[in-house]
Amino acid sequence: MNTWNSALAVFRKELLDAMRDRRTLLVVLVSAVLMGPLVLMALSGLIASFEAKAEQRELVVAGIQFAPSLKNYVERQTWTLKEAPGDYEQKLKDSKLGDPVLVIPKNFESDLLRGDSPEVELVSHSANKQSQNGARRVADLLRGFSQERVGLTLALRGVSLDLLTPVKVQEVDLANNQTRAAQFTSMLAFFVLLAVVSGAINAALDSTAGERERGSLEPLLMNPATGMALVLGKWGAVAAVSMLIAVLSCLSFLPGQWLLRSDTLQAMFQFGWTEVALFLVVLLPFAAAISAVLMAVAIRCKSFKEAQANSTVVVMAVSLMPMVSMFNQSGEEPWHLWVPALAQNTLMMRVLKGEGLTALQVAVPLLVCALLTIAALGFVARRLRGAAVR
């Protein structure tokens, strides 16, 4: 009982110390609250720009005067023709031109009348995402023109148009709206993980390496409280701050949905109280574990600056883990749930897709986080005992 009372006293003391650094705490809190709306605004703005470009139905073309039949078809499809600038290649490279350019040769119409296949160029730039997306739409437009020409030719010869499509393909997309939205919102899980780490890092470093640098760690060890009580109190305060950031980050997506500018994304992205609760089930154990790990890293260091340098390894590891699922094209693997950060990212992606979580999927990361927390806190306790002996 004395151990828990001592741990509670240390917890209050460390939490007050963390609250006193108001400037750092305010920056972390504000960034956690604003993260959701800002990310969703940027994402919806990007999608809205693509949608606006698609609705404009503009075709930038060079040499349209050589293809009156193509011009007639394009205008019948309610597309607007625009003359390509003379330096369109350079503008595409510099991303100053957001549309692909269709280049038509002089012999286009004559080749078409002879029954030959004229060759046109659809110029885009792979680093220019807007031109890349526009190239697909223009290619579909040209395929429609080709099919119409072939259909007219066969009709004049009395051949049935059904011969052009001996096999009819009906595409069936098994993904629901939330799964399709997750293709765009997958970065949300990544930002939430980083927010949890950023919430823990300052408090973890200050309560260990910071106290050692200030010379207040040794007097603290002279108190009658046991080493484990000190460790539990310090860890509880760090974990509380990290968990607070996790809660604020998840809640920020609720009002963030009001700022969506893309109607398509607004219709597909469903993030309510259920999703918030599932996110927190995944994130809170991770916040506890990452707090203990950061304390274990910092307790080895003699100064706050050295602890900051060492903690970047943890931040980098958390940043890189979600990329495993990005590069793994075979889908989720069972071992993903046993890797911290990767497991949390995997489960949050399932929530964003609307697939739900099973008890086993939640239990495995929870067990890993618990073991990691115990190991890290044990290491911190041993280092504190060593410091007390010296």
Image (tube, rainbow, N blue to C red):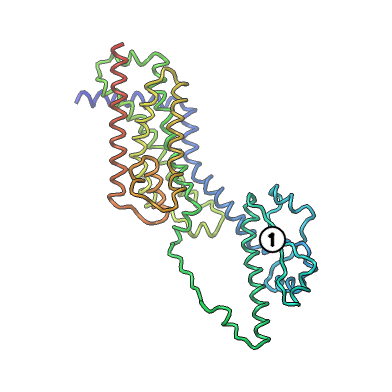
Residue 331 on image: x %, y %: 41, 53
Q: Residue at x 46, y 21 (%)?
A: 306
Quarter of the view holding residue 140: bottom right
Residue 51 on image: x %, y %: 60, 59
Classify 74 as above or below 213.
Answer: below
Classify 215 as above or below 140.
Answer: above
Q: Nearer the viewer, residue 377 or 127?
A: 127
Amino acid type of the residue that numbered disc 1 sits on in the rendered structure: Leu
In this rendering, would 128 be left or right of 389?
right
Q: Residue at x 30, y 28 (%)?
A: 377
Classed neighbour count for the residue bearing mark 1: other residues with Cα under 10 Å, few (<14), some (14–19), many (≥20): some
The residue wearing badge 1 is 122
Q: Residue at x 54, y 59 (%)?
A: 263
Which image quarter holds the N terminus? top left
Residue 261 on image: x %, y %: 57, 54
Q: Secondary structure at mark 1?
A: strand
Which image quarter holds the C terminus? top left
